[in-house]
Image: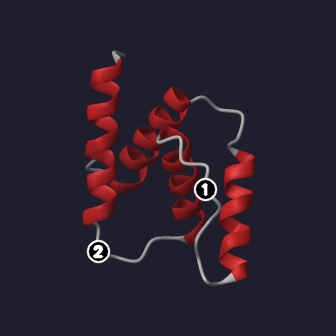
Amino acid sequence: MKKETLRKKFDEAVAVVNNYTEPLPADLLLKLYAYYKIANKNFDNPGSKTPLINAFKANALFQAQNISREEAMKSYIKLVKKEFKEG
């Protein structure tokens, strides 16, 4: 997949998640969080005011640390298509 096409599909998948209004399972949110952060090369520490949430986010990032930016985008898109049935 070309980089421009991949980025466009990734941005569309992000929009699906951002526009979704129902509650989502925590494990799904953590996977999406990790893929999003890697895809956008954002390696800042989690910014929640709750230490436990920061720990879960840091763990999700740690588990996904060995994937490339492109793989993170593809994984995000695949997860959205699977879980949201419209992405």
The mark closer to the camera, 1 or 2, is 1
- The number of callouts visible is 2
Q: Name the residue under label 1.
A: 44
- Contact between marks 1 and 2 (CB within 8 A): the answer is no
For the residue labelled by badge 2, is the local secondary structure a helix, a strand or a loop? loop
| Mark 2 Cα-neighbour bin, 10 Å: few <14, some 14–19, many ≥20 | few
Q: Which of marks 1 and 2 is nearer the N terminus?
A: 2
Specify the quadrant of the image occupied by residue 17: bottom left
Q: Note whether 47 is above or below 2 in the view shown.
A: below
Residue depicted at 46% across the width and 32% down the height: 74
Q: Note whether 46 is above or below 37 in the view shown.
A: below
Left or right: where 56 falls relative to 2 = right
Mark sitting on residue 61: none
Q: Position of residue 4 (x, y in %)?
A: 28, 23
Residue reaching furthest to the bottom:
50
Residue depicted at 74% across the width and 59% down the height: 59
Residue depicted at 54% across the width and 29% down the height: 71
Residue depicted at 58% across the width and 71% down the height: 47
Left or right: where 70 falls relative to 77 = right
Q: Where is residue 84 in the image (x, y as percent from the top left)?
A: 34, 55
| Mark 1 Cα-neighbour bin, 10 Å: few <14, some 14–19, many ≥20 | few
Residue reaching furthest to the front:
44
For the residue labelled by badge 1, is the local secondary structure a helix, a strand or a loop? loop
Q: Which amino acid does label 2 sit on?
A: Thr
Q: Mark 2 points at which residue?
A: 21
Q: Where is residue 3 in the image (x, y as percent from the top left)?
A: 35, 20
Nearer to us in this view, 57 or 25: 57
Q: Which amino acid does label 1 sit on?
A: Asp
Q: Where is residue 32 in the image (x, y as percent from the top left)?
A: 50, 54
Nearer to us in this view, 72 or 43: 43
Q: Tell me how far mark 1 sits from mark 2, CA to CA.
A: 26 Å
